[in-house]
DNA sequence: TTTT
DNA sequence: TTTT
């Protein structure tokens, strides 16, 4: 049938990424939190969600992503289960497949673009496009 | 800054919707589960997630959605917290803003289209489009 | 089989919306242009596309959207054909089903939120959500 | 400010892909057409759009994609301009960054999954995910 | 708690 | 130029 599992979120980083390596593999994994606000007429609610990312994107998160920063995340929702002290535990998180830096001030634009040139080069398919 | 929180999932319904009404409001709320599979070369993983929907969409879920059925969901990720026996509890779910029926057999196409004509009329903006 | 046609774009408005009414129907239609930039290491390209929107969203575009403004558009791609002087002509445009205002400066946030309270109330399903 | 240009379409291939190579680069480029139907109560409309894809995805399109086949496309809208006989010409197309095969019959599931194992291995980040 |  |  085919599947589809796509998440796009623009929010603020709630804690600095921690980067570790999968034991026995030289694959970096970065984890951090994201908060996405939603304001309507009468209320404001925030979706807090943990973000995981792998490989080069994880390295760049470790280098450039900091608490408070706005970030555009594209990825998929994932559901993990494990046992803890004989108890079943489970958790949703977003596996980020693409991360985009977003400047929060018009004035910062110039600087952002240059300082984030490397990260932005990480977006999907950047190497494949000839024109 | 603006926010973005968009989820699109194509999966199978894991339990029949239960529909109830918000007390004091005549607003229907439907809840059910969705399983989204993801196969790669070496493994298969499934994301289980609870779906909530409101209003006319909720009514139609109560009427047409059944366990096992494939469904295309568009909505947003939401994070709820509450207290239970003095313990903080929290949960992620997807608030479905648009639901689309998906036939799983080519042969069913004809019938699906007609039996689901009403539901499919519920998609975003259906009333607004003049041509 | 089900269909899917979803477009999400964050860009700048290239001309002020023109709002007209479908003759014989009191349905407003707004049209304007959007430019979405894409920078990579070696080049910058811009996707120019025409946006159409209907109903209440169209009215709000007429009232609040102006040339140069950044805008987040969600909708679907549409393909129109017609005859002009015996020639077949065709055109792609995006039918916007949801429009979100995006402030371009952190400082503007407060004001934006309030001045755009009405528009932001137009997002999908705003009326359906009970909490 | 950051940009966003995301297109997701599920439709049928309208012509077999033609694959050529960028002169001087060993980069394959595949082009084909897609038709996305949209039925509402009173009408049916079809969005025809040209799809371009590069690299390994292009090769797989050349090998596996055929006219009539349903396909899930994820990518971005692109706008190209050129001169033809002194006339300015322009065109929208979708640059596909990810393509997913979608079986149209439940019965085909088994075979599809296996025959398309290679293509599906091309989805975003397949190599990066450790579990 | 789970679907194909 | 068009698919189901």
Image: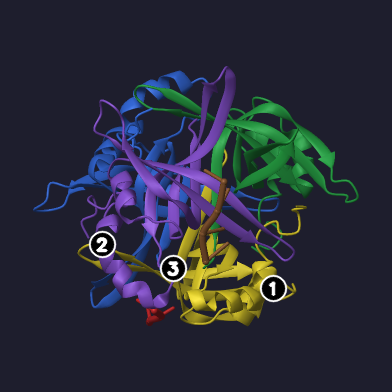
Chain colours: A blue, B yellow, C green, D purple, E red, F brown
As drawn, D114 above or below C68: below
Residue at the spot of label 3: B89
Is label 3 in a helix, a strand or a loop?
Answer: strand
**Residue B112 coordinates in the image, percent (x, y):** 59, 76
User: Residue C76 or C108: which is nearer the viewer?
Assistant: C76
Closer to the chain start, of discs 1 and 3, is: 3
Q: Are marks 1 and 3 in contact (CB under 8 Å)?
A: no
- Callouts 1 and 3 in the same chain: yes
**Residue at the spot of label 1:** B118
In this picture, residue B126 sits left or right of residue D14: right
- Displayed quadrant of residue B28: bottom right
The outermost residue toward the right is: C24
> Furthest residue to the top?
D86
Above or below for D40 versus D30: below
**Residue drawn 82% across the image and 45% down it:** C28
Q: What is the quadrant of the C terminus of chain C in the image?
A: bottom right
Judged from this view, the residue extending furthest toward the left is A24
């Amino acid at each position: 049938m085919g599947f589809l599992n796509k998440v796009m979120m623009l929010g603020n980083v709630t804690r600095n990424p921690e980067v570790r390596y999968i034991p026995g593999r030289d694959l970096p994994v970065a984890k951090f939190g994201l908060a996405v606000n939603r304001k309507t007429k009468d209320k404001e609610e925030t979706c807090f969600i943990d973000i995981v990312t792998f490989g080069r994107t994880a390295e760049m998160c470790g280098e450039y992503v900091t608490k408070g920063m706005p970030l555009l995340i594209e990825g998929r929702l994932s559901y993990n289960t494990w046992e803890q002290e004989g108890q079943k535990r489970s958790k949703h998180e977003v596996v980020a497949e693409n991360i985009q830096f977003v400047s929060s001030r018009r004035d910062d634009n110039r600087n952002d673009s240059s300082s984030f040139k490397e990260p932005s080069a990480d977006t999907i398919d950047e190497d494949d496009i000839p024109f």
